[in-house]
Amino acid sequence: MRNSVPEEFNHVDWFRHSSPYINAHRGKTFVILIPGEAIECAHFSSIIHDLALLDSLGIRLVLVQGARPQISRILSDRRLPSRVEDDYRVTPQDQLMDVIQASAAVRVQLEARLSMGLSNTPMDGARLKVCSGNYVIARPLGVVDGIDYGHTGEVRRIDSEAIFRLLEDDNMVLLPHLGFSPTGEVFNLKSEDVATQAAIQLKADKLIIYADEAGVFDASGHLYSELLTKDADAILKARSLSSITHAALEACVQAVRSGVPRAHLISYHVNGGLLQELFTREGSGTMIDEDSYEQLRPAHIDDVGGMMALLSPLEEKGILVRRSRELLENEIDRFIVIERDGAIVACAALYPFEQEYAGELACLAVSPDYRGSNRGERLLKGIEQSAKKQNLSTLFLLTTRTAHWFMERGFKATTLDSLPTKKQALYNYQRNSKIFSKML
C-alpha cells in the first residue's frame, strides 16, 4: 500500500530539514575543486547532477578542474618522465603540449556533462551556462633549490571582476589548472593553488575540495566532521596523510586563514557526498573552521565551579535535575564544555550504556547571555562524535521543557521500555520527563 512507505525511502523529512541550509546557501559563492581522479570515478555523473542541483538552488559556482592522472597517462604513453618535486609537477618545454592536451580533454568532458539535458534524468531542463577563459594570471615558479620547474607556475592573481560579471549573469565558471602570463606563456599550476586563490580573491563563502578520502581521520579511524585550523596545522605537521589529502587540507587551511568562512573536504567516492555535506547536520566530510576564542573541550575538575553557576538557575526552574558539586566532580569525565575568555558558557554530558550500545545525553545547558549562536548545536555535535567513538549507535535523552529543540535536530519521541534497563529503573515518574532518541 502507498501509505506504508518504508522510512528509509521517505525523503520528505530530509527535504524539510534541508530547507534552512537551502535558504542559507542561496546567492552564495562556492569554489569547488574537481580533481582529475574524480572525473574518472564511478560517481562522476552524480557529481554533475549535484552541481546542477546547486545551480538550480541559486548557488553561484566556480569550478576548478585538475588533470593529474590524465597528464600522467599521456606522459606514460609517450614514455616521457613524470617528475614531481615538493608536490609540484616539473613541466619542461617538451611536455607542455601534453599537459595542455590533457587539460583540454578534461575541460571538454566537464563542459559536455554539464550541457546534458536528457529527459528522465536529474539534468532535465537544467540548461546550465558554463564559461571558461583566461581568468587565471600566472607566473613561473622558476628555479627552486637548483630544480628548474620549466612551465610549472604559481597563481599571480585571479581576474575576479570578470568572474563576478559572469556569475551575476547566472553563468557557472570553469577554471582550468592552467594559467596565462602577460607575456603570452602558459603555465601548469597546482589545482589546489588555483582553487585556494580563487576562493580567497573572490571572497567566496566556501571552498570545497573533492578528494579520494572522505576527509581527515583520527588515529582510531574516526572521521573529523569539523577541524579548527590550529588542529589541522598539527595534523599537517605530523605528515600522516596521503600526499593528495595533505595538499587538499593545506589548501583548506590557507583559504580559511585568508578569510574564506568555511572549507570542506569530501570524497568523490561517496554518492551524493556534496549534498550530504551542505544540506545535513551530520555532513559527509571534514569542515575546516578558523580558530575561535571559544573552545569546545573535555571538562576538567577546575571547571566544576563554572559549571555549577551555569546549571544552578536551570535546576531551580526544574529544567535540569539537581547535581551536587561532589557528583559533578565524580562525573567530570562525562562532560564537555565551551569556554569563552576563561568562563564556562555551555556544557553537556554523555553517559554510556555499553551493553545496549546506547548513550544518554544529559545536562545540555547554554548560558542565557550566549544563546542564539549555535553553541547548543556545537555541544550536540561534540556529544554525537564522542558517542560514535565509543561505538554507541543510539543517543537518548529525557526532557521536560526542551522537546521541540531536540525534535528539530533529528530526535524522535520514544517510550520508557526502549531505554536501557538500568535507566528505566531510575526513571522519575514525578518529573514525567518526555523521552527522545536518535540513531547515530
Image (tube, rainbow, N blue to C red):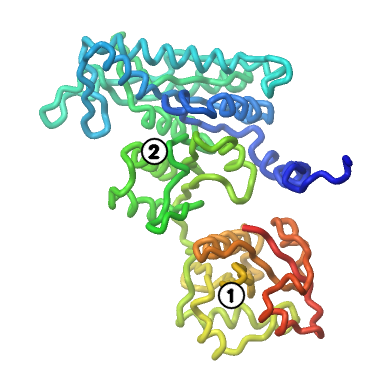
**Whole-percent x and y of residue 63?**
50, 25
For the N terminus, the image quarter is: top right
Answer with the quarter of the image where residue 150 lies: top left
Kind of residue at disc 1: Tyr
Name above or below for residue 364 compared with residue 378: below
| First along the sequence among labels 2 and 1 | 2
26 left or right, relative to 415? left
Answer with the quarter of the image where residue 348 lies: bottom right
In this figure, which residue is indicated by the disc labeled 1? 351
Camera-side mark, 2 or 1: 1
- At a point 44% along the width and 16% down the height, the residue shown is 106
Q: Do we see residue 400 in this rendering?
A: no
**Whole-percent x and y of residue 89?**
26, 25
Residue 248 numbered tag: 2
40 left or right, relative to 117? left
Crowding near the residue tagged with mark 1, few <14, some 14–19, many ≥20 C-alpha atoms within 10 Å: some
Alpha carbon separation for disc pair 2 and 1: 36 Å
Name above or below for residue 27 compared with residue 289: above
Name above or below for residue 93 compared with residue 230: above
For the C terminus, the image quarter is: bottom right
